[in-house]
Image (cartoon, rainbow, N blue to C red):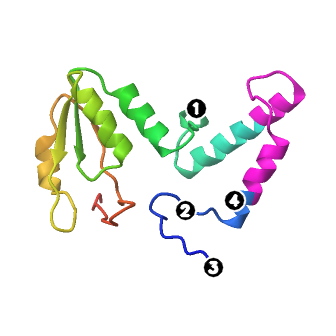
Amino acid sequence: MDIYFDNSSTTKPYKEVIDEVSNAMEEYFGNPSSLHKIGIKSEKRLTEAREFLGKSINASKEEIYFTSGGSEANNLIIKGLVKTGHHVITTIFEHHSVLMAYKELEKNGVKVTYLEVDKDRKIDIEELGEAISKDTVLISIMHVNNEIGSIQDIE
């Protein structure tokens, strides 16, 4: 029997998820931008998925984007939103893709504040408040850290 200890990186999907994805790959494989029957069918299914997800987080379907994974999504948001002269706030315990994006942006004139964390790897909310400036455009802090399990008190 194999034992898997890397759930902080990737967790095996539930059987129901595997079945749904498999079905989608068989039934909705067409390019959703194409005008042929399978493309139109695929576009309809994508729209339904965006609407479903949007309703679950109180967003419109136009606000839902699909990416290949977390690293691409992090880079899309960070590099798409943050420009030279902006300020962002994060911690040193963020996902590698987040930290690498910020290191790259720092070379291009973006000011990055790395908040300290306590022994439980939690930020000080007062320190966060003090770090916010008129140039702050993004605060990027994991609510629950996938590797060390710390939970930030965001309430």
Height in image: 111 above or below 71? above
Residue beneath disc 3 = 1
| Residue occupying the point 58% across, 38% down | 66
Height in image: 61 above or below 122? above
SS for dot 2? loop
Sequence order check, earlier mark of 3 and 1:
3
Q: Position of residue 90 (x, y in %)?
A: 24, 45
Q: Is the Cβ of the residue at disc 3 closer than 8 Å to that at disc 2?
A: no
Is there any visible trace of residue 137 in the rendered image?
A: no
Q: Position of residue 132 (x, y in %)?
A: 16, 39
Q: Is the Cβ of the residue at disc 1 closer than 8 Å to that at disc 4?
A: no
Sequence order check, earlier mark of 1 and 2:
2
Query: Which dot, 1 or 4, sits closer to the camera?
Result: 4
Query: Which dot, 3 or 1, sits closer to the camera?
Result: 3
Report the amino acid beneath label 4: Val
Q: Is residue 112 left or right of residue 60?
A: left
- Residue 17's label in the rendered image is 4
Sequence order check, earlier mark of 2 and 4:
2
Sequence order check, earlier mark of 4 and 3:
3
In 3D space, how far apart are the residues under numbered discs 1 and 2 (Cα atoms)? 28 Å
Q: Position of residue 24 (x, y in %)?
A: 78, 46
Residue beneath disc 1 = 62
| Residue occupying the point 28% across, 29% down | 104
Report the amino acid beneath label 2: Thr
Query: Which dot, 3 or 2, sits closer to the camera?
Result: 3
Residue beneath disc 2 = 11
| Residue occupying the point 14% across, 53% down | 116
Magenta region, residue range: 19-43
Report the amino acid beneath label 1: Glu
Assess disc 2: are there few (<14), some (14-19) or many (≥20) residues with their C-alpha within 10 Å of its C-alpha: few
Assess disc 4: are there few (<14), some (14-19) or many (≥20) residues with their C-alpha within 10 Å of its C-alpha: few
Q: Residue furthest toward the bottom?
A: 1
